[in-house]
Image (cartoon, rainbow, N blue to C red):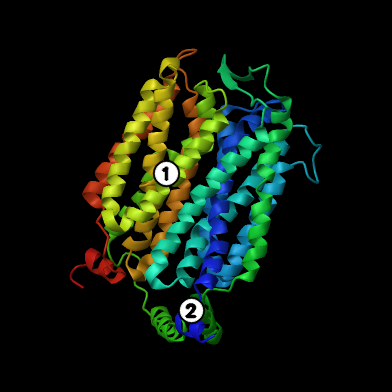
Amino acid sequence: MTSTNDKGSKAYLAAIVMVAVIGGLLFGYDTAVISGAEKGLQAFFMGASDFDYTNAMHGFTCASALIGCIIGSAISGLLASRLGRKRSLFTAGILFFISAVGSMYPEMFFFEKGVPTFQLLMAFNIYRVIGGVGVGLASAICPMYIGEVAPSNIRGMLVSFNQFAIIFGQLVVYFVNFLILGDNVNPIIELVNNVNQVINPEASSWATSTGWRYMFGSEAVPAGLFALLILLVPETPRYLVMIGKTDRASAILTRINGRSKAEEIISDIKATLSEKTERFLAYGWTVIFIGIMLSVFQQAVGINAVLYYAPRIFQDMGMANPMVQTVIMGVVNITFTLVAVFTVEKIGRKPLLISGSVGMAIGALGVAITFGNPALNIVTMLSIMVYSASFMFSWGPICWVLIAEIFPNTIRSKAVAIAVAFQWIFNWIVSSSFVPMFNMHLQPGDNFGHWFTYGLYGTICVIAAIFVWRMVPETKGKTLEEMSKLWRPEK
């Protein structure tokens, strides 16, 4: 007992963080589950008799969860302040669970099962938006929760594990989708005479009627587990002090850090809470613009077009089992995310972002040049891997690190909220535009949409590298107080 009072319990801290990062895992799981399900889902709704399910509709459906993400991130600050961090995460878990069950069985309560209609499509999208709200909440509150319970000397590392959990969640769902599909053949959908057609006669009817349901429904298991486990962890000490429960906050901090360190932290929390808030533009437009553009570029480079549609891309390349390549890509992604976690404090933020931008540009342009040429399929696949891996050690985790660091203390909460909102808005724009843009044809049978789409992403990657080089300051080794001096040197 004395040891715990003096040094704290690392096992207790690890247990708390492990529960919290399940929220990050669900973030990745929910946003990537569409990658394996979207072909069967598209074929299912193309069977509707009361409307034509177009490419534009499918693009919107695949990205509809992102509307919820925008809503969830926008209200995350309000919920975290009103309900607390813990209850907000519990709410996110419930929303994940409702979305999983509803997306699996959208006919529930109101519609005949297995009969695609426009009303059923609307119901499906509503369930996906509900899940998106959960993602938006988790994206903002999971790092906040971990940061507020973690000791300062390991806070950065522990918060970084949330990004690792996001990528791990994507890998898990790639593998789950692969197991669910099994030996069944996903429908191959192409544009024929400007009309969508399911043209593969060997495609499994099970994949169209049932497979996509199991993929969405599989999320109910981790979602339910997260909602239950989050009830067992404590509220964050910072929030408890905010609502006047200092004794409870002190007990939690003592268990994590030891008694003497807990007293110091309580004192620091009280000092931070009493800090004066400055007006939003106290440091000028430049810092706000840079924060927003970091978020915009993180999405505009097009990574989610790969993460969400990986099986479709590999299938269009003629791969025998595109889910295998998707799982391999997931392993590559998680490996290179670890590269960022362990090098960001050694190499710095700017070098990683610039080198990642260059790597992504090379990969994207490689896809644009070689896609559709069967003799160069291996080059195309390797280009996609380079493109994805380059994002994972750069813009994926480092954007979040910079957004957390770059804003001065007194405007951070508002500035981060705006930057994250732009991130989800551009995530939605890229994801919803990919399918119609990818399927553009200047004449029947050409690959105009393929090379245009990845050529555009590659060009944006080059612009992103120039932006980081010219405008983004290096924050490695700087304290948060030095951020204020960076943007307003006279103070």
Mark 1 is on which residue type? Gln
Residue 357 horizontal/vertical position (percent): 31, 41
Residue 139 horizontal/vertical position (percent): 50, 56
- The residue sitting at the left extreme is 490
Identify which residue is drawn at 41% across, 51% down.
338
Please name the residue that numbered disc 1 is placed on.
299
Residue 89: assigned label: none
Please name the residue that numbered disc 2 is placed on.
8
- Choose between 11 and 333: the one closer to the eye: 11
Q: Can you tell which quarter of the image residue 388 is in?
A: top left
Q: Residues within 10 Å of mark 1 (few under 14, many from 20)?
A: many
Residue 52 horizontal/vertical position (percent): 66, 26
Q: Is residue 57 left or right of residue 202?
A: left
Q: Earlier in the sequence, mark 1 or mark 2?
A: 2
C-alpha gap between disc 1 and disc 2: 40 Å
Q: Is residue 92 left or right of residue 346?
A: right
